[in-house]
Image (cartoon, rainbow, N blue to C red):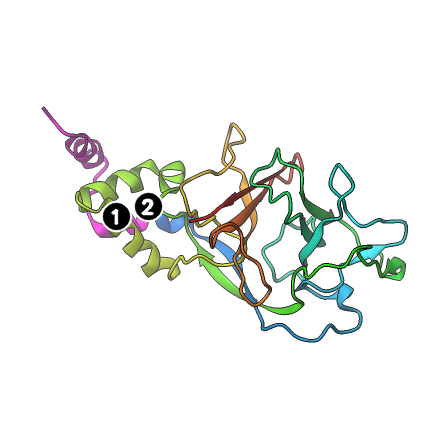
Amino acid sequence: MDSHFDKYRAELSKENLTSFEDLEDLIKPLIRPATKIEVSKPSELKENTQLISHFGGQPYFEKEEEWPKTKDGQELDFIFQVFNTGEINLPDNIQLVQFFYDWEESPWDTENDGWLVKIYKTLNSDRVVKLNKSTESEGTKFCEVIFKAVKSLPDWEGIEMYSRNASKLSCILNEDEPWDSYQKAAEKLAGEQLYRSQIGGYPNWVQGEDTPDQGTEPMKLLFQIDSEEHAGLMWGDVGLIYVFYDEASEKIEFTLQCH
């Protein structure tokens, strides 16, 4: 009885897909630009931090806005904000993105209360106001950020969603450790795909592929945020949060995975 590896081998040979170089050719078109967020060590809160990208500290608010709350009126903690400078992998229709979270609720999924992705399509800097939470808490530490351009590819958990042939070829190139060939090819083409705080690109899953499906194609990653020691962030047991965004519908999906 033929194994599934034999089946893959027969299917791929019809398309002349047999080598590591063929695997590279399959995944090269999948490369997406992304922006790595490097979180600096905590520092003293500066004036007018509402107008810069950062973790913790003062978020951007405009007149007549209120501090975000849960459904039962609990104020959310401000986690971070990122301004679209044109050199960051945010959709063109987003000028500023912010993330708020309730550590008491500790939501894990879109349907849970206690998280908010706040998007500004336009900014009115002449209407900026300073708002503080009414209750004091330790919250996220104020940290400035550094952005670095990186290349992103799906992780092994997700490659089948974007290229079944790449998944199959990886399997026949190394039947004992099928992920090994793919990871080597991905690292050669785009560098190490490590857990990291990142804007755009593809998610690096902790527990397994969970990209929301729009029906026609997977939703695109808006950002993922790692457990960041400098900012005092710990998502479950050293996990990450993932936020997906569809430009056309403006739909937002959220999930958290940890070890």
Query: x%, y% of residue 187?
Result: 34, 59
Query: x%, y% of residue 232?
Result: 58, 63
* Residue 97 visible at all: no
The residue tagged with tag 1: helix, strand or loop?
A: helix
> Does the magenta segment cover residue 12?
yes
Q: Quadrant of the N terminus?
A: top left
Between 8 and 69, the one lying in front of the other is 69
The residue tagged with tag 2: helix, strand or loop?
A: helix
Residue at the outermost left position: 1
User: Mark 2 sits on what residue?
Assistant: 26
Q: Residue at coordinates 83% horizontally, 58% vertically from top-left?
A: 131
Q: Residue at coordinates 34% horizontally, 54% vertically from top-left?
A: 186
Query: Is 201 located above or below residue 149 in the figure?
Result: above
Left or right? Give the position of 27 relative to 71. left
Query: x%, y% of residue 190?
Result: 39, 59
Quadrant of the rendered image containing residue 80: bottom right
Q: Residues within 10 Å of mark 2 (few under 14, many from 20)?
A: some
Q: Residue at coordinates 47% horizontally, 52% vertically from top-left?
A: 237
Label placed on residue 153: none
| Callout count | 2
Q: Which residues are magenta?
A: 1-26
Residue at the outermost top position: 1
User: Mark 1 sits on what residue?
Assistant: 22
Q: Are marks 2 and 1 in contact (CB under 8 Å)?
A: yes
Query: Is 233 located above or below residue 1 in the figure?
Result: below
Between 181 and 227, the one lying in front of the other is 227
Left or right? Give the position of 157 relative to 53. left
Main secondary structure of the magenta stretch? helix
> Does the magenta segment cover residue 51?
no
